[in-house]
Image (cartoon, rainbow, N blue to C red):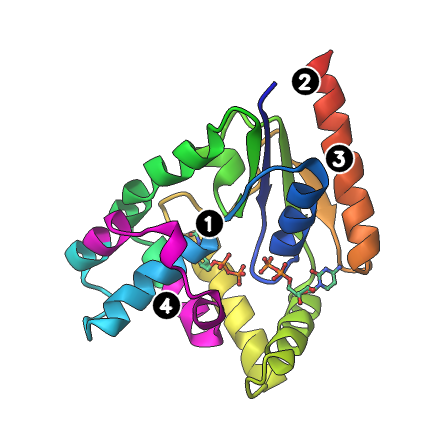
Amino acid sequence: MSFVIAIDGPAASGKGTLARRLAAHYGLPHLDTGLLYRATACALMDEGLPLDDVEAAVEAARGLSLIDFDEARLRGREMGEAASLMGAMPAVRAALIDLQRNFASRPEGAVLDGRDIGTVICPNATVKVFVTASPETRAQRRALELASRGEEVDYAAILEDVKRRDARDSERSAAPLKPAADAVLLDTSELDREQAFAAALAIAEGGRMKARA
Ligand code: CDP
Ligand code: CDP
């Protein structure tokens, strides 16, 4: 049976961490789809092109190769902001669909995390989780993460980033950030990493049993 786990949620909700751990637990491949939008923005920046050049962005999105990703660079604060501009362009989203669906259609299944996995990319996923946490909690987590990587941290600016990105991702017309009707909501505001993983695993197991029945 193919086992596809779709994890969506806003910035720094912990979806990537959960997706990685679930993938390791079940021995499935994992795709952090945010990296696709980050890498598209990065390609434009490297060529000195403006971030609103739709044609160039579509070409960059079509030319992406998962093995070329420099994750340390792509996960920087500036790149998250630029990625959300890419995510608001319907033509860029369309250019990234096949790559994501091909990844999800491996025989054993896969874990994908992002904003529209349960709604658009994998509407038939075995399990859908929508991870949330308060903006303050998420900004704190992102600040700790950036500080641990040696980036300069200004909590107030990071909280602003988080709120601005929430608004842009939720209000855009193309695949706005929202839970799929059949997603299970997981609020991690009061949960540490272990508790959040235990809760996500329980949801995944529930979905797996249901699909087998
Ligand atoms: O890790 P974080 O949630 O901060 O960001 P990310 O998942 O790497 O996504 C960066 C940006 O890419 C988001 O703010 C979205 O605008 C966009 N994105 C998207 O539109 N759809 C996805 N499936 C994944 C990311
Ligand atoms: O992928 P997304 O942007 O949603 O978040 P992430 O990169 O998985 O997590 C952001 C930060 O929050 C990481 O440093 C995690 O270790 C931390 N964290 C978490 O993921 N879950 C918690 N319950 C507490 C902290």
Asked which secondary structure carries label 4, the reply is helix
Q: Is residue 77 magenta?
A: yes
Q: Is mark 1 within 8 Å of ligand 1?
A: yes
Q: How many marks?
A: 4
Q: Is residue 168 visible?
A: yes
Q: Quadrant of residue 85?
A: bottom left
Q: Position of residue 207 (x, y in %)?
A: 71, 26
Vertical order, 7 against 82 (above or below): above
Along the polypeptide, which appears first: circle 4 or circle 1? 1
Residue at horizontal 44 percent and vertical 72 percent from the top: 73
Magenta segment range?
58-83
**Disc nearer the start of the sequence (4/2):** 4
Residue annotated with mark 4? 82
Label 1 – label 3 distance at C-alpha? 21 Å
Looking at the image, residue 125 sits to the left or right of residue 60; the answer is right
Please, is residue 14 above or below residue 125 in the view?
A: below
| Residue at left offset 33%, top offset 44% | 96
Q: Secondary structure at mark 2?
A: helix
Specify the amino acid type for callout 3: Ile
Q: Position of residue 93 (x, y in %)?
A: 33, 46
Q: Which residue is mark 1?
A: 33
- Of labels 4 and 2, the one closer to you: 2
The amino acid type found where label 4 is placed reads: Ala
Q: Is residue 30 left or right of residue 83?
A: right
Q: CA distance from mark 4 to mark 3?
A: 32 Å
Q: Quadrant location of residue 4?
A: top right
Tag 2 residue: 211
Question: How far, Cα to Cα, is label 3 from label 2?
Answer: 12 Å
- Measure the C-alpha gap from mark 4 to mark 1: 15 Å
Amino acid type, callout 1: Thr
**Sequence-first tag of 3 and 2:** 3
